[in-house]
Image: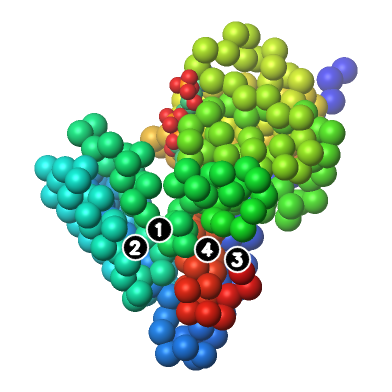
Amino acid sequence: MSVTQTAQLMDGRGLAERIVKEAAAKAAEISRRTGAGPCLATVLVGEDPASVAYVRMKRARCARAGIQSRHIGLPAATTTAELIGTLAELSGDPEVHGILLQHPCGPHIDERAAFEAIAPEKDVDGVTMRSFAAMSFALPGFVSCTPGGIVRLLEAYDVGLAGKRAVVVGRSAILGKPVGMLLLAKDATVTYCHSRTADLPAIVREADVVVAAVGRPRLIRGEDIKPGAVVIDAGYNPGNVGDVDFDTARARAGLITPVPGGVGPMTIAVLLAQTVEAAANQLGIGEH
Ligand code: NAP
């Protein structure tokens, strides 16, 4: 007889609310002590509806947490040089403490060059090479928000990672790669999988912790989840569908993130927390 277990859900929404509340309290304290509130600049090239919606949501969350935001909407025809000029200007503006360049920016933009124009102390989205290096060397700096949110979720649910086999499916610079580095720093044995990986299911079957960061609906199937494993689904596909087949995975996992309500809210919470931290540092009352 097969025994069906049901995984405990990892409540990203609840944890994110607590993180945002803490950030809001710190933002209020910064305003009280310095007379200047934290300010996040959001930069968007073009008017892609999904990007417009993401930026609007991030700014609304900022407002609710008492963080100011300044939006710079640039025409779709903006060149890489013009975008770099805008980002350099914001990097030098003392009234701006954090900078978020919403991506993708469009095929004509050299996105890496644009990211690198963000001053490291204002890189609250953790997208620059310097932030990645600092994270990899466990030095102070800002982490890429989704990986940072995933690690906070794992910590909140007391998931011990030392000696555990972690499998990260996806290797993008903002998600797969950094989350693997953060798990490695916590002494997990990390395997990266990607589009050229041979026999993905066989590798997933060995994982104590699976992070799905692909952008392919229900790619990871429940039958490949090791019983009791921790399943983190960072995927977000049209129709609120993750990269994990939730129903079948839930029947085998020990802990699992829902989509929506798992990783998504954590990403914004980390963005807000890092914006407040950046403001505190720049206004001379930070911890670093
Ligand atoms: P991305 O840049 O497109 O990277 C996707 C990765 O998945 C690549 O490394 C790719 O491999 C790999 N891949 C593609 N097809 C595969 C397959 N069949 N088997 C194994 N690996 C495969 O995407 P991303 O920006 O990292 O985003 C990934 C997902 O996370 C998306 O659903 C996105 O919406 C979501 N996301 C969510 C949040 C959030 O806040 N919740 C934030 C960011 C992203 P190659 O490198 O070989 O091409």
Query: Which residue is disc 2 drawn over?
Result: 91
Point out residue 203 in the picture as x, y percentages from the top left corner: 69, 17
Q: Are marks 2 and 1 in contact (CB under 8 Å)?
A: yes
Q: CA distance from mark 1 to mark 3?
A: 25 Å
Label 2 sits on a secondary structure element that is: helix
Instruction: Answer with mark 4 or mark 2, whichever residue precedes in sequence.
Output: 2
| x and y, in percent, of residue 93 in the image | 31, 70
Among the two numbered marks 2 and 1 on one chain, the one whose residue lies closer to the N terminus: 2
Instruction: Name which residue type carries label 1.
Output: Ala
Q: Badge 3 is on which residue?
A: 19
Residue 22 x, y percent position in the rendering: 60, 73
**Is the C-beta of the residue carrying label 4 under 8 Å from the nearest atom of ligand 1?**
no
Amino acid type at image mark 2: Ser
Front position among marks 4 and 2: 2
C-alpha gap between disc 4 and disc 2: 16 Å
**Closest to the observer: 85 or 203?**
85
Marks 4/1: CA–CA distance? 14 Å
- Dot 3 alpha-carbon crowd within 10 angstroms: few under 14, some 14 to 19, many 20 or more: some
Q: Residue at x 59, y 21 (%)?
A: 193
Q: Is residue 45 above or below residue 269?
A: above
| Residue at which label 1 appears | 119
